[in-house]
Amino acid sequence: MVTSLILAATFLFQTAQGFAPAGNPKLITLSKSAAPIREVLKDIEKQTDYRFFYSHAQVNTKARIDVRVNLASIEETLEVIFRAAPIDYKINGRQILLSPKKERIRLPALIAPPKEQILENYPQFKITGLVKTMNQEPLPGVTVMLKGTGSGTITDINGAYELMLSDGSGRLVFSFIGYASQEVPINNQNVINVSLEEDRQALEEIVVIGYGAQKSKDLTGAIGSVDKKTIRDLPVASIDQKMVGQVAGVRIQSVSGIPGGGASIKIRGTGSMGAGNQPLYVIDGMPYSADMNFNTNPLSLLNSSDIESITVLKDASSTAIYGSRGANGVILINTNKGQYDRTQIQISSMRGVQSVPEKGRPVLMNQREFAELQRERITKIIYDREKREATLEDFPEEYRHYDQMIGEGTDWYDLILQNARIQDHNIGISRGNSNSKFSLNLGYFEQEGVVRHTGFERFSAKLSADSKLGNKISLGASLLPTYIRQNRTTSNSGRDDIIGNALWQNPVMKPYDENGNLIPFINSPPNVYKSAWSGVNPLFALREIKRKNQNFQTMGIFYVDVELWKGLKLKSSFNGILNNVENSTYTPTTIGSPNSPPNQATVGSASLGRSHSFNWLNENILTYSQSVGDHLFDALLGYTAQSFRSNGINLDAVPFTSDVVTTINAAQAIRSWGQDIQKWTMLSYLGRVNYSYKHRYLATATFRRDGSSRFGSNNRYANFPSVAVAWRISQENFMKDIQAIDDFKIRSSFGKSGNNNIGNYSHVAGVGSESYLIDNQQVSALAIGIGNPHLTWEESRQLDLGFDILAFREKISFTADYYFRKSVDMLINNRIPAVTGFTSQTINIGSIQNRGLEINLGIKPLSGNLTWSSNFNIAFNRNKVLSLNNNNDPVYSGDNDGNPSHITMAGKPIAQFYGYIFNGLVTAEDLANPNFPRSNGHILGGPTFKDLNADGIINPVTDYAILGNPHEKFFYGFTNNLSYNNFDLSVILSGQYGGKVVNGLRQTLDNTNAHFNIHKEWVNRWRSPESPGDGRHGAVGGEIGTNSHTMSNLWIEDASFLRLSNISLGYTLPSQWSKAVHPKGSARLYITGQNLLMFTRYKGANPEAQASNRSIDLAPGFDIASYPMARTFSMGLNLSF
Amino acid sequence: MKHLIYLILLSLLSACSDRFLEQFPETSLNEGSFYKSENDFIGMANGLYTPLRDYTRSQFWILAEIPSDNTSFMFNASENASSSSWQPSDFFQSTASTEGTFDAFWTTSYRGITRCNKLLSELNRPLTWSNPALQERTLGEAKFMRALYYFNLVRLFGGIPLITTPIDYEQATGIARSTTEEIYNAIIKDLKEATTHLKAAKDVKEAGRATAGAALSLLGKVYLTRLNYVDAEATLKEVIQSGEYELLAAYSDVFDPLNKNHRESIFAVQYSENNAGMAQDFIFRFVPHTSGGAITQRSGVVINNSWHGWNMPTRDLI
């Protein structure tokens, strides 16, 4: 595993060559005559990352050779050098081991021991041992030294060493490039085995950036990357769910538990009201649209085991290279490819079970409490209407006998839930020689829904091949076909969807009939005074309504890389994404709707939507790198063209008189139909210059010019410049002596990026069609709508100040970033002078600011046999709307029975909760007071709200106030990795503090009108002046109902939470076992628990949940009938050989 | 050599970039694919009349007729009429509810003017008309309608912003009022030009469209309004002498729904009963509220809304 990681890093570096700083070109140029081999090897070490290991005693490197290679690979070079010399070599990652030809390696001797010393102090204490990696792979070439002396040796090809010392005292130091050194006291032991921990070499790590890669030490921007190893075991469908809590400032909100459903990802706050806040994804160089799609996550089309690296670009300096699409941040995802000189088969298999935790399930009235509520309402209505007391006969039979109501009644929510299977199986084969590499990965993922009859399946493949044609040309292609299918239901929208339905259904009624069959429709007992709502049996609906989504997508990537000149390279690529989606629904004749049971006249209905899209991108990137002394330049110049077109049709067919044939053709008519074609095109010019002086002073300037069909003709091209500077203070002489500090860098960047999600044709004037009568004939009367030739992108200007500290031999890393991001030219529907012929128009006018702080702390307190590394990140963001339209009129949004639930106004954070302020329950005194403000349902014990405009009437909106802020104060992630011998353990915690959430379902359902089953808290309702309950839960209404279920502060709760996201425990089989099967074999078993615990004061299930029919930007924090989040336990096996 | 090919390829790509970036909706009518045939322009000309129809039905008479001596507002207490804008209008009171009527009239008027301006500015496009008279008619209609919209506006508001080309919101923000004189000059100029164009379109006359007779009659009315009796007489005489129009024998025939666009009608807003959006509801609004269905004779429509019978003609009008 370790070896493959090193190889992967090397490979990344190799492919990224064109863009990386010129420090280490992969290709070697040598021109030597009669030079000692030793000198030639030193030259290679200078030019590359490769290091040679050999024993001077055995390998004669003083022999002189002639060597002439030009831009050759390491394999070619070594072939030339050692063609004639009696030396064998072996490339092992970055290490090259030399040994005498055709001779078994003998026990290594001392490295150049001073002869006098040997004579005077003849060694007689013998130590032997094995040096291995943490994964029990032998580590050759490790230097073993007696501390404080020149005595030592190196390990052989099997990781074994033997050392003769004068006595058994002192300490041995094991050191090896790429690994943390280890000291072991000898204490007269004759056998000392050690495992070396991989040294991440944080500074030399290659980080993928936009259109290239850089060494970590040369970065100037605010960039976060995800440690692939930490998140490998997480049993989830898509990569975004794995990234939760991993990168500071990247807020991944699990808005629902829908298998394969979407998540909301925001980087550095909300910068747009109408153009979306989701970042841009770039997969292997291909921008990938992943707008938040509630039901199907576009990222679920990507198999996360195909992913090699994930980098998050946050500041303007790193995102500006993506121009008009970079404002919300960029997430770069690179998939893995084969490796040169290696054949490997990797198999992974995972199986688990998901269930819905008890905590957070709705706590509703039981059957007896429900019956009491029904009887109380009926009693009151009878009193109001007939001025008499109710008798038992007035109640429906089902509610009469409390004594027969044993148990809680039907738990409808529990009825629709199940323990659900999850599984993930992957096999990957990669093979390569020195010129070509090839890989094939196949994957299957299945996640049954914890809500019955729902689920998600993915079949994916990835095929890639890369090859070199001579020294100057390399080319490659990859193909990623994926097929997913989903069985869906309706959720996250309101009380009428299936999950909503299960949250209010009558607990007195039974789901099954005497024969054990599901009853299709639950009729609440009818009563002349008051009947509770009736509705479809949610489990029956889940089983019978077929709601399917299928998506077949193929991503294809082809590139050719040509070295035109020394240091000058051209990379041309042609990428495409072909996507086909089909959505179909069939609702059979047996399905009723609330209060309208299915009958003879009920008909079936079907809908079918299909769309296909093609997105292609051509990129031509020139790169040039040059170093002059201590000055290092590299430059990039590019031209790209991209086009997208989708074409979809949808049909809605009704009626079906029977459910035998459910395809569209069996319907008697097509009720509605439509076709939609969307197209956009884009042309871009981009450039970047990196400059570094002694890797101490770093500067980056980028520029992108985007032309987009989405922009109006007067603003067709947009320019996005950025600059960044960084200073590695630790490289200065005055700091070089501070041993504790490995690296200290301060960074600053400023730039612009854009958000072009403004609709494809918003700037185009439509032609409206009306009718008029000419010559008594109806003719079409056309009018040109309002176009906006100025319409353009939303622009984000961002300043970033940050620093990185690496200390105590990379044991502590600390990064902090302050950012100030101002989004201007926000699209807002603005009132315009009527003399234009129109009254409103969407224009670029509003602005929002986000300020924040991101901190990331990594520590490695323990290394050696027991290792512990820990990473904590936290991000604070403060959002403020600076201006809206011309008059700064507030923007109302959300929906609560036709009224808004959120308000956005200048000077406040975007989308504040907006509603009534609860003012206690109506007393007899209030009722008698004619001046007491009235509202609908003004009854004794009923709820009342503040009459803010003091007009005596409590009206929606005019008496609304800001009730709270849905945005968190900060959010955080805390990851711990431990390993001991063959065991590894990782623990991931994530959470947020502050921010509010509305329990939307309570806001919709919770009234005492006895329509629905409601929260158990209502048992403590006002019953009489003597028994006023808890003061929050009002009286049951009589003839007049109550209006407690309006938007008010009653339903606003604290959204803070701490989630134990994941615990994984792994065990790597001892290498002797796996080696017995295959020399390169390794095997690891693990168990993992996902979403294990949640600490929150929120009474709903998921404080991050969001309604699907309300904007996450303008009506956030609205949790309604949410698909529950599963808790998953799984176990898996990883094999590689 | 290879580099050269790339350079050529790059420049080729740049050359076609403007067209590459020009994308219009394929599934709906839009400006990008419009102005291709004379029917597009005739369709736009038809669109000039609909704002007139809409405000004539819903606002113009509330602002122009009810405050006059011809009719007065009659409130029927049995009907729920909590927010009528008619009564205040009768007594020239400005309230929140009359503001809505003024606002709608203003907005609808400028919607009509904008359509005229847009049609006139796009008519310059090179296009071969099957019959040049159709182009003349379209030009004439646009100028006539613009004059009519301004005439109704200027009489209600006095000096207003004079806009004769399509403008965007930035140009419109803070635009100044022109004087009454300037407005009338523009109206007279438009009507004179409309007359010329419409005379050339004599052979393609259609009921409901502006005609030379209509333009001359409106011009005469404008002169009368300006107290310019000399020009008024000359202009209106031309209408009479054209021989195209005459008074009908029976006054009641003028308003007979079965007898539309007769010889007494010079220019009439066109309504149709077949389509709710194109229909006129005066018959329901102005009928005495005690009449039931006796007058309207529309069995399908029961008069029980709160709108009927409120605009009562005064005795001297009858």
Image (tube, grey):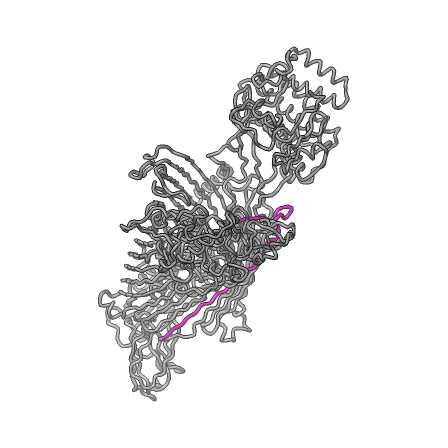
Front in this rendered view, residue A830 or A621: A830
The image shows residue A285 at horizontal and vertical percentages of 42, 51
Quick check: is A712 in the magenta stretch?
A: no
Q: Magenta stretch?
A: A866-893
Residue A367 vs residue A772: left or right?
Answer: left
Quick check: is A867 in the magenta stretch?
A: yes
Q: Is residue A38 visible?
A: yes
Residue A1060 vs residue B287: left or right?
Answer: left
Q: Quadrant of residue A657?
A: top left
Classify the position of the N terminus of chain A by image quarter.
bottom left
Front in this rendered view, residue A304 or A158: A304
Front in this rendered view, residue A219 or A844: A844
Residue A744 vs residue A442: left or right?
Answer: right
- Height in image: B101 above or below A65? above
Number of callouts: 0
The image shows residue A551 at horizontal and vertical percentages of 36, 46
Q: Please, what is the dominant secondary structure of the magenta stretch?
A: strand
Classify the position of the C terminus of chain A by image quarter.
bottom left
